[in-house]
Image: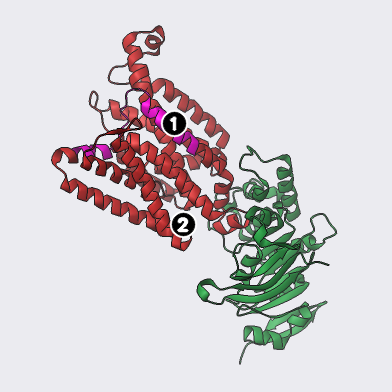
Amino acid sequence: MTPILAVRGLTWQPDRRPVLGPVDLDVLRGECLAVVGPNGAGKTSLLRCLTGLLRPTAGELRYEGQSFATLSRRELARRIAYVPQIRPASVPLSVEEIVLLGRYPHLSPFQLAPRKEDFAAVDAALALVGIDDLRRRPVDELSGGERQAAFIAAALAQESELLVLDEPTIHLDARHQRDLAELLLRLLRVETEAGRTVVLATHDLNLASLLGDRLLALSAGQVLACGTPSQILEPGLLEKLFRTRFEIVRGGERPVTLLQLGP
Amino acid sequence: MRPHPRIALLVLLLLWTAVVIGAPLVGSQPISLGDVLRGDPTAEAIFWQLRLPRVLLALLAGAGLAVSGLAFQTLFRNELAEPYTLGIATGAALGAVLSLRLEEMGVLWGMPLVSLASFVGAIGATALVVGLAWRRKGNTGTLLLAGIAVSLSCSALILFLQYLSDSTQTFRMVRWMMGGLSVVGYGEVLWAAPWVLGGAAVLLALRWDLNLLLTGEELAASRGVDLVRLRLQVLGISALMIGALVAVAGPIGFVGLMVPHMLRRWVGHDHLFLAPACLLGGGAFLAVCDLAARTIMSPAELPVGVLTALLGGPFFLWLLVLGRRE
């Protein structure tokens, strides 16, 4: 099977400072790839390269065999949706308005109003995320969890097959973390129409374990290891990755990591 | 207060229409619509040749200033950004002052040299701002700082030129910088209309991009907005619009700040509604200001730029106090 996203020799060196790479990576259709690693490992830079926001210093990215270099920003956005971690403190629009803006790559500047299929995509995204009741609410009045849900709905309205999320559960309480995890699991069922491929970066190793089909351990801009949760969430590798000790217990099928205190 | 974009737009349209019809009737010599329609020669001359062109120019200038102010505020995510903060209007003023100093009042393309010089000044200042910020790939913070630096430098040069000039020249320079809409006939209106209407049409076509910017630059770029191109488009269009307006009306401050600020609370932030609202509201606002400027001290006239500047400061204090209370 051809990978949905193929990355070869990806290097990002702003001002000749090596931040990332070289990275080789295949993202497979319908999988969830969780990128883990310490602060400053290059997770966000990798995600920004995968979405085409950063033009790599060297290397090549291909979406279904098509080189990023031959795709315009809009064409790329129809294929890849991104939910960044950092957003403005105030977004003076309603939920419906920001979700509709997810349709941007499908809209023409000469179009007076969004088309029927744009509104249908908005409705579908709001229903999928389960925030239809928030539709008319101003984003600035929402709680952190609701706001994250609204931005994810906006990314879904973009109708891109690949969804890239940077720290999606940061600042979320346990219930909202569960809601988000369940939403992503629903999206990952590729046999459904809403089927997506997901790449996410997270500090939450247990979320990575819960969602990730594969985990990518990134250290100082390099791929330390890539494999199943059981292969990556292993005391020796984690100690090498984070320079701190973990205990691993089994929770169902998935490994659960516990941070160890002391020397 | 929840915004009501459609109702607001309708009210603004009615207000705008009332201004177009009503404002030319008021002045040091009041005339009635009946006299104009009956064909009274004095009333006709005052209405068609003196007051209507002036009101139309005010509508165009207010519209252009407000809509480019709006575009800048969204682009820079800063409610204090406007053509003045970015050195465009100061560049235009420098061009005008320089040409007054050179005292070559020739006429080119039907425009007096001072107008042409201010137009070139506006474009030149914008090119300089963009050029200075280009090394940082035109990120908004650098653009804003470069704009302020260019604006301050132009102001300093204007002071220097005024110091070098004799008192007659200095007076003309100061008078020009107060801004004014006293025109006879439609030459200025016909000159300003295509720039303002064309510019507004392009900014309206960019409404999705501008709306997306409200959700953050990173998100906008990931949706397919070419940020560098968008910044160049907004800056370039605004420079042409403001340059064309300053050329005929002089620098008129604070309209680009006040009008979008007032309308946002009422119309909301969606540029599909806010941009047309700024066109209508900015025009009506400046036309009413000009109406006040030519009647308060009647038969003498106050330059409209002085009036808008006098309103600007208290307006922001009021916003600050009101904003705190909310």
Q: Amino acid at mark 2?
A: Thr
Q: Tell me, by letter, which chain the rendering colours green.
A: A
Magenta segment includes B185: yes
Q: Quadrant of residue A73?
A: bottom right
Circles 1, 2 touching at the beta carbon (< 8 Å): no
Q: Nearer the viewer, mark 1 or mark 2?
A: 1
Query: Residue B7: x, y in percent?
Result: 55, 32
Magenta segment includes B245: no
Could you say whether the residue bearing mark 1 is in a helix, strand or loop? helix
Q: Quick check: A127 left or right of B202?
A: right
State the mark number for residue A81: none
State the mark number for residue B140: 2
Q: Quick check: A70 left or right of B314?
A: right
Q: Quick check: B80 left or right of A160?
A: left
Q: Colour of chain B?
A: red
Residue at 40% x, 21% y is B22
Could you say whether the residue bearing mark 2 is in a helix, strand or loop? helix
In the rendered view, tell whether residue A252 sits above or below residue B57.
Answer: below
In the rendered view, tell whether residue A234 sits above or below residue B247.
Answer: below
Residue at 38% x, 30% y is B58
Q: Residue furthest bottom?
A: A263
Q: Which contiguous range is marked in magenta?
A: B171-199
Q: Amino acid at mark 1?
A: Ala
Q: Quadrant of residue B23?
A: top left
Residue at 60% x, 80% y is A220
State the mark number for residue B193: 1
User: In which chain is the residue bearing label 2?
Assistant: B
Tell me the chief SS of the magenta region.
Answer: helix
Residue at 58% x, 50% y is B212
